[in-house]
């Protein structure tokens, strides 16, 4: 009674059968792993050229592979670029957020970074020799989810007070005053912000700092701030998905995300007192009217701002977004940055700020004005590899 | 009747391990005691055997090296935070990043330790009954045709990537919580103080519920296998003595499978503690101690996901890494506590037997 009988034959058979299946599975896994490892080392998954480039475009060495990471604001445009860019160069951009992009390029784990927030003083010290090259611009818009309520008007003060938590209800008198015709519900506002370090947050908090002294003193601007109220979501896509799905929320994303995800976004009052609903035209005029004084590519871009542009029809929350790349490319991407890779990178950047700009409008980004493109061309022209300059192979004018 | 269960528990204990053929009797255990000397005849090992020995040893060693290198990296990368705050980091309740408004920064781990323990606790509380129930049903009660189907269904749950759980959370659970569950909890259990604050749909409770669903397959699948491994003779013995179905499960199956089930719970808890994506998408990512189960918070894993690479400087970075070290420590403590508990439970039984 105290000793259990040995395992009965049927269950023994099951065990044996099971263990044999286990062996098959294990063998299959090992084979797959070996194939994958072999594939990586043999370069099967790398650099398959996405269709030859059209004639008259860049002629970089084929088979180069460029990895970039950063801003989720500019990701849709980057994705378009990497899809259409030919020239035998595969570009792979990861939308990890601006702060992570800066971290990655500082650690030299990517060939280029992208950020909507310029490098601050500390970051410039950590990663010396980084060039700041504006590659596009866009508008950041307040998105909201109010069932049955149409277009809303906001101004900087009201947006700041919502994000400060001093305006807590959708039918707050300040909101009603701006939107006398809208039937605003008696519901609490759920504020949504970016939980990761974000260039979009930088643009948003910079704008709120300009508009509200209380915000500037208590919260300030940054890729990550100490949000007084609300819920955090990761990346533009996360904020967009959350607001799109959750009634009575308010958030902020790049114009592209609001339009492609079909989320209601509000007009914002500009310094001329006009309420402007962001679109490709009024963000473009905002960038032109800002008449930016551009620093040198290696200089301090922290205070370059196209916010609150003076034109009467300009959208007030418009900002440049930047590519970050080392001026000296030797050793800039660990040991894997060879001369051909440097050439491929330079060509891609040159193509992006010139030909690539034609893809901006369809994706609701602002094509760079001529004077910024000229400055970019000079910046890209200053890139070197092993002491020698790396001229682009795209021809003088594109 | 009691004797059957007790002996089962004991022989299981002496058999050790999770071998599918655990019915090692005391006498057999005695003979296996001499077996190693037979196996270890020196110099006469065939080559396949040596190869096998080498491979498995290598596997074990690589694992050890991995664990140690992770600990060393975490420790060295969190040095700055440790030097700045010392043990104060463990009791610090504020997490403030520097901005243009104020360069002041301070980092404390309490909000995230609380967030982690709360969400995992909720997950275990809600998930364990579900997981054990389904495991016991499949292993002992289900008709044959249901066994395979149910088992596969549970394993399918385990195969769903956590980001999918996160999306499901945002699109299904969060709206359900906001419109139905949270208001009801507030209305009927608001007096407890655990369900205060604004109703938003996301937060600690929502993440806990999603985690509960995520750990069910882990706990259920492993428990089920252990229950399957209970020899039929155990259950037959109980049945022959007139035990009902429930009694048989209680006195024959469960005690026998105790160690395995415990292991399953620890595995599940481990998954809950470390889960990142689904939590990040539903907890609200606020760097503050949750004021109620409905309020937003942050777990250590979601903190790392949000702020490891996107930080405002070296001090914040090392503070985030130190949080990772704490998570490792929590997992270790959970494991040790589980083992102690298990040891005490089986120890207690031995004492009873000795009397």
Image (cartoon, rainbow, N blue to C red):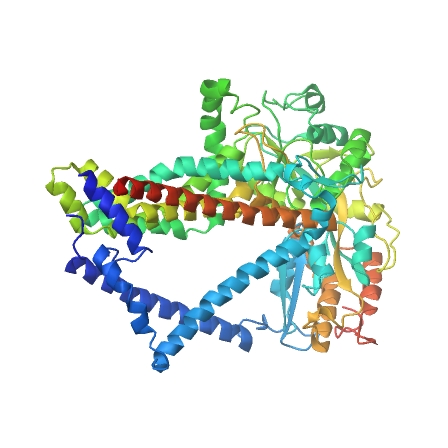
| Residue B93 shows in the view | yes
| A277 sits left or right of A249 in the view | right
Residue B207: x and y, percent? 50, 38
| A137 sits left or right of B114 in the view | right
Q: Residue furthest front?
A: B355
Residue B151: x and y, percent? 29, 50
| Residue B225 shows in the view | no
| A6 sits left or right of B109 in the view | left
Picture layout, residue A42 above or below residue B355 = below
- Name the quadrant containing residue A147: top right
Residue A111: x and y, percent? 70, 65
User: Residue at horizontal 32%, vertical 64%?
Assistant: A22
- Name the quadrant containing residue A353: bottom right
User: Residue at horizontal 17%, vertical 45%?
Assistant: B235
- Name the quadrant containing residue B32: bottom left
Residue B145: x and y, percent? 19, 49
User: Residue at horizontal 76%, vertical 63%?
Assistant: A325
Near-viewer residue (A307 or A370): A307
| B153 sits left or right of A142 in the view | left
Picture layout, residue A116 above or below residue A354 = above
The C terminus of chain A appears in which quarter of the rendering?
bottom right
Near-viewer residue (A109 or A146): A109
Near-viewer residue (B88 or A124): B88
Picture layout, residue A38 above or below residue A83 = below
Labels in figure, total: 0
């Amino acid at each position: 009674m105290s000793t259990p009988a040995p395992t009965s034959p049927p269950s023994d058979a099951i065990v044996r059968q099971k263990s044999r299946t286990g062996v098959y599975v294990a063998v299959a896994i090992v084979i797959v792993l070996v194939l994958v490892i072999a594939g990586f080392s043999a370069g099967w998954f790398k650099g398959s050229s996405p269709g030859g480039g059209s004639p008259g475009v860049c002629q970089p060495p084929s088979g180069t592979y460029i990895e970039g990471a950063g801003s989720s604001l500019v990701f849709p445009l980057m994705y378009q670029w990497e899809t259409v860019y030919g020239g035998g160069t595969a570009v792979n951009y990861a939308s990890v957020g601006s702060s992570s992009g800066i971290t990655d390029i500082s650690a030299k784990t990517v060939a280029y970074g992208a950020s909507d927030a310029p490098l601050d003083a500390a970051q410039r010290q950590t990663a010396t020799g980084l060039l700041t090259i504006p590659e596009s611009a866009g508008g950041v818009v307040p998105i909201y989810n109010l069932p049955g309520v149409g277009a809303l008007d906001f101004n900087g003060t009201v947006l700041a007070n919502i994000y400060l938590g001093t305006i807590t209800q959708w039918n707050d008198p300040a909101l009603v005053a701006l939107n006398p015709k809208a039937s605003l519900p008696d519901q609490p506002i759920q504020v949504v912000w970016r939980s990761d370090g974000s260039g979009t947050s930088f643009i948003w908090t910079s704008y709120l700092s300009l508009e509200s002294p209380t915000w500037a003193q208590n919260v300030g601007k940054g890729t990550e701030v100490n949000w007084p109220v609300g819920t955090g979501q990761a990346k533009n896509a996360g904020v967009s998905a959350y607001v799109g799905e959750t009634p009575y929320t308010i958030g902020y994303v790049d114009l592209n995300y609001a339009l492609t995800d079909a989320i209601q976004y509000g007009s914002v009052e500009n310094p001329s007192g006009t309420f402007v609903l962001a679109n490709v035209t009024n963000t473009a005029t905002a960038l032109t009217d800002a008449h930016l004084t551009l620093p040198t590519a290696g200089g301090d871009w922290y205070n370059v701002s196209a916010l609150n542009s003076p034109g009467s029809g300009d959208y007030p929350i418009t900002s440049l977004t930047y590519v970050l790349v080392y001026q000296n490319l030797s050793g800039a991407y660990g040991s894997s940055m060879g001369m051909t890779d440097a050439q491929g990178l330079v060509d891609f950047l040159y193509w992006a700020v010139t030909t690539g700009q034609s893809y901006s409008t369809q994706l609701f980004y602002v094509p760079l004005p001529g004077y910024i493109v000229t400055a970019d061309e000079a910046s890209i022209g200053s890139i070197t590899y092993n002491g020698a300059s790396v001229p682009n192979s795209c021809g003088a004018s594109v | 009747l009691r004797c059957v269960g007790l002996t089962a528990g004991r022989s299981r204990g002496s058999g050790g391990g999770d071998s599918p053929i655990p019915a090692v009797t005391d006498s057999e255990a005695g003979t296996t005691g001499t077996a190693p000397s037979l196996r270890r005849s020196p110099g006469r090992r065939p080559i396949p055997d040596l190869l096998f020995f080498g491979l498995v040893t290598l596997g074990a060693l690589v694992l050890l090296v991995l664990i140690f290198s992770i600990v060393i990296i975490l420790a060295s990368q969190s040095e700055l935070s440790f030097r700045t705050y010392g043990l104060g980091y463990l009791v610090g309740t504020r997490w403030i990043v520097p901005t243009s408004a104020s360069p002041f920064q301070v980092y404390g781990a309490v909000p995230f330790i609380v967030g982690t323990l709360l969400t995992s606790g909720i997950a275990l509380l809600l998930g364990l009954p579900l997981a054990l129930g389904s495991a016991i049903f499949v292993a002992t009660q289900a008709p044959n045709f249901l066994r395979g189907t149910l088992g596969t269904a549970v394993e399918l749950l385990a195969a769903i990537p956590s980001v999918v759980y996160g999306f499901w959370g945002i699109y299904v659970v969060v709206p359900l919580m906001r419109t139905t569950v949270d208001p009801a909890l507030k209305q009927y259990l608001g007096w407890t103080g655990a369900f205060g604050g604004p109703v938003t749909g996301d937060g600690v409770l929502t993440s806990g519920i999603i985690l509960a669903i995520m750990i069910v397959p882990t706990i259920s699948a492993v428990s089920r296998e252990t229950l399957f491994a209970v020899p039929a003779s155990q259950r037959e013995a109980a049945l022959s003595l007139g035990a009902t179905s429930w009694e048989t499960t209680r006195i024959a199956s469960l005690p026998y499978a105790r160690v395995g089930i415990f292991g399953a719970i620890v595995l599940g808890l481990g998954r809950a503690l470390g889960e990142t994506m689904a939590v990040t998408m539903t907890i609200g990512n606020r760097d503050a101690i949750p004021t109620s189960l409905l309020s937003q918070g942050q777990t250590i894993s979601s903190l790392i996901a949000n702020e490891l690479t996107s930080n405002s400087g070296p001090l914040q970075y090392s503070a985030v890494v130190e949080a990772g070290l704490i998570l490792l420590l929590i997992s270790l403590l959970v494991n040790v506590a589980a083992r102690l508990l298990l040891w005490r439970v089986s120890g207690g039984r031995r004492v009873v037997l000795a009397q």
